[in-house]
Amino acid sequence: MSDPLASLPGYLLRRASTAALAELNQRLGEIELNHADASLLILIGHNPGVTQSEAGRVLGIQRANMVPLIARNEGRGWLIRQQVDGRSQGLSLSPDGEAMRRKARGVIDGFEERLMERVPQELRPHVIPILGYLWGEQN
Amino acid sequence: MSDPLASLPGYLLRRASTAALAELNQRLGEIELNHADASLLILIGHNPGVTQSEAGRVLGIQRANMVPLIARNEGRGWLIRQQVDGRSQGLSLSPDGEAMRRKARGVIDGFEERLMERVPQELRPHVIPILGYLWGEQN
DNA sequence: TATTGTTATACTCTATAACTATA
DNA sequence: TATAGTTATAGAGTATAACAATA
């Protein structure tokens, strides 16, 4: 039983991504988070005052799909909205949100470390650059 | 506006994967295929007689989700089912299926080539090994 | 007992179109 | 005229549970 797809970078990229994401979400599930929530908390933690639209652009999530994501995390008491002008609100973390951000960061760091350990040491320095090039966009 | 996620391999993996998949599906859309159909045709082309369950295991698709995938491609006249025993059927490509497989292969090869071109030449030999390691599974 | 194919169903993610209010 | 936030909705993709027939 041969797999003619296993030599295709695009295919490997997708399989590696879905496997890694499933593992990350399982780990984050233990603190009742998913990867989208965690990314949002980390992004806002590093950029207090960022608007919903800006955050969506950075995270690759459309405006419309940001609404339930923000609402869920605001509803959990983790986000604070502050009016910037008549149409945008700057987002920042509440103390509880900052505590969750820290927990999420711990889970993610552990996950990223284990992900890197799968790669032989001599290739590890190339992982981030290669993934950045494959992503392409502004990177 | 800083992106604290851009240095995380897991995050880069997911962003690179979704960007690449969107581009591949756009290209495959021009021949009215998606990546799942294309992978299936290529897998069966290389392994005539493979069963639905086996194909699902290799492709990482669950039995239940193979049903509409096989049905769609059989309905388009591309797949042939031949009874193996009372419960399984070996899958193979019809002449039309083989023609589509060839077209799909052409689109994918073009896509994979362009994907690789984003990576500086000296790093290219590391792309497939690194993605294989990140995938982990049996690879 | 385990496996194959199948149905039904639910849940998440993503995409589009439209609306309002503000700039 | 463009942008921010919002609503509603549709389409993928994926997951689980159950069943009949067969090994």
Image: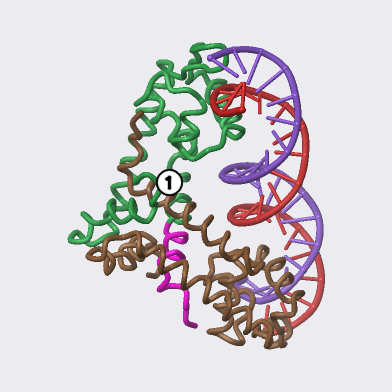
Chain colours: A brown, B green, C red, D purple
- Side (left or right) of A49 relative to A1: right
**Image x and y of residue B4, in percent:** 47, 78
Q: Chain of mark 1?
A: B
- Crowding at dot 1, Cα within 10 Å, few <14 / some 14-19 / many 20+, comes out as many
Taking the spot 48% from the left edge, 52% from the top edge, the residue there is: A19
Q: Is residue B29 visible?
A: no
Taking the spot 57% from the left edge, 16% from the top edge, the residue there is: B87
Which quarter of the picture shows residue A116?
Answer: bottom left
* Residue that mark 1 sits on: B24
Which quarter of the picture shows residue A89?
Answer: bottom right
User: Which region of the structure is painted magenta?
Assistant: B1-16
Taking the spot 46% from the left edge, 37% from the top edge, the residue there is: B59
**Image x and y of residue B15, in percent:** 46, 61
Q: Amino acid at mark 1?
A: Leu
Q: Is residue B2 visible?
A: yes
Taking the spot 23% from the left edge, 62% from the top edge, the residue there is: B120
- Side (left or right) of B102 relative to B39: left
